[in-house]
Image (tube, helix red, strand yellow):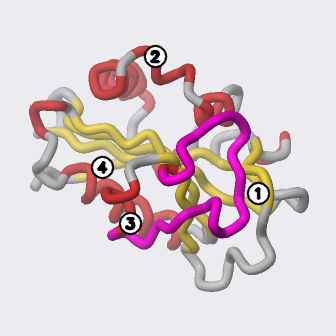
């Protein structure tokens, strides 16, 4: 397996190229991108995989701060996670997810939401966010909208719309 390392500022252009290659340039039209506009990703939860220290990126994962419901409960949104098409199916994406969820828990995040393939994320512990009373602004496929408690009981009493974080939480952590 290839080592996971923290994202570096110099990785930004390669990450955008990898995301375009993996998801297409139209990815920025999706609902989750509206929640990310003008909000810095959480740098302690941004990781990459390279073949070696100076090689092109093989994989990347980022998280973004969001707020849940009227009381604006803090949460993180996983994504995007991308793996170069030539390296998909080798466990890089799963390793990035496990590593970053552990890091999110370590730094005190309590809830994680995402929009992604249910069969892929279910083994990590994600369940239907809609069934838990959460909603996304704009259209997303219900089965792709998922949530996970990083701290047991963190979702108790939490319901409502996923929103951009309050202004004070939009800067890089």
Tell me how far mark 3 sits from mark 2, CA to CA.
26 Å
Q: Compared to 120, does 6 lie above or below?
A: above
Q: Which residue extends farthest right?
A: 70
Disc on res. 122:
3
Pointer 4 or 2: first along the chain:
4
Pointer 2 or 1: first along the chain:
2
Q: Compared to 63, does 10 lie above or below?
A: above
Tell me how far mark 1 sits from mark 3, CA to CA.
21 Å
Tell me how far mark 4 sits from mark 2, CA to CA.
28 Å
Q: Compared to 79, does 103 lie above or below?
A: below
| Picture residue at 26% right of the left edge, 57% below the top | 94
Disc on res. 5:
4
| Picture residue at 36% right of the left edge, 19% below the top | 24
Q: In front here: 37 or 146?
A: 146
Label 3, secondary structure: give it: helix
Q: In the visual, does 115 lie left or right of 164? A: left
Q: Residues within 10 Å of mark 4 (few under 14, many from 20)?
A: some
Label 4, secondary structure: give it: strand
Disc on res. 68:
1
| Picture residue at 80% right of the left edge, 58% below the top | 160
| Picture residue at 59% right of the left edge, 79% below the top | 151
Tell me how far mark 2 sits from mark 1, CA to CA.
26 Å
Q: Residues within 10 Å of mark 1 (few under 14, many from 20)?
A: many
Q: In the visual, does 155 lie left or right of 17? A: right
Span shown in magenta:
123-143
Residue 14 appears at what percent x and percent y? 32, 22
Q: Which residue extends farthest top?
A: 25
Label 2, secondary structure: give it: helix
Q: Nearer the viewer, mark 1 or mark 3?
A: 3
Provide the residue designation for mark 2: 26
Pointer 1 or 3: first along the chain:
1
């Amino acid at each position: 397996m290839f080592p996971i390392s923290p994202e570096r500022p110099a990785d930004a252009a390669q990450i955008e190229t990898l995301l375009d290659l993996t998801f297409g340039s139209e990815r920025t039209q999706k609902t989750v991108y509206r929640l990310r506009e003008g909000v810095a990703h959480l740098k302690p939860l941004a990781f990459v995989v390279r073949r070696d220290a100076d090689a092109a990126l093989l994989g990347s994962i980022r998280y973004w701060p969001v707020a849940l419901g009227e009381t604006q409960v803090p949460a993180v949104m996983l994504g995007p996670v991308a793996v170069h098409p030539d390296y998909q199916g080798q466990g890089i994406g799963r390793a990035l997810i496990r590593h970053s969820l552990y890091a999110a828990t370590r730094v005190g995040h309590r809830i994680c939401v995402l929009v992604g393939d249910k069969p892929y994320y279910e083994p990590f512990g994600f369940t239907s966010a809609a069934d838990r009373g959460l909603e996304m602004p704009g259209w997303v496929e219900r089965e792709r909208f998922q949530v996970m408690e990083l701290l047991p009981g963190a979702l108790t009493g939490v319901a409502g719309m996923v929103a951009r974080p309050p202004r004070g939480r939009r800067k890089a952590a």
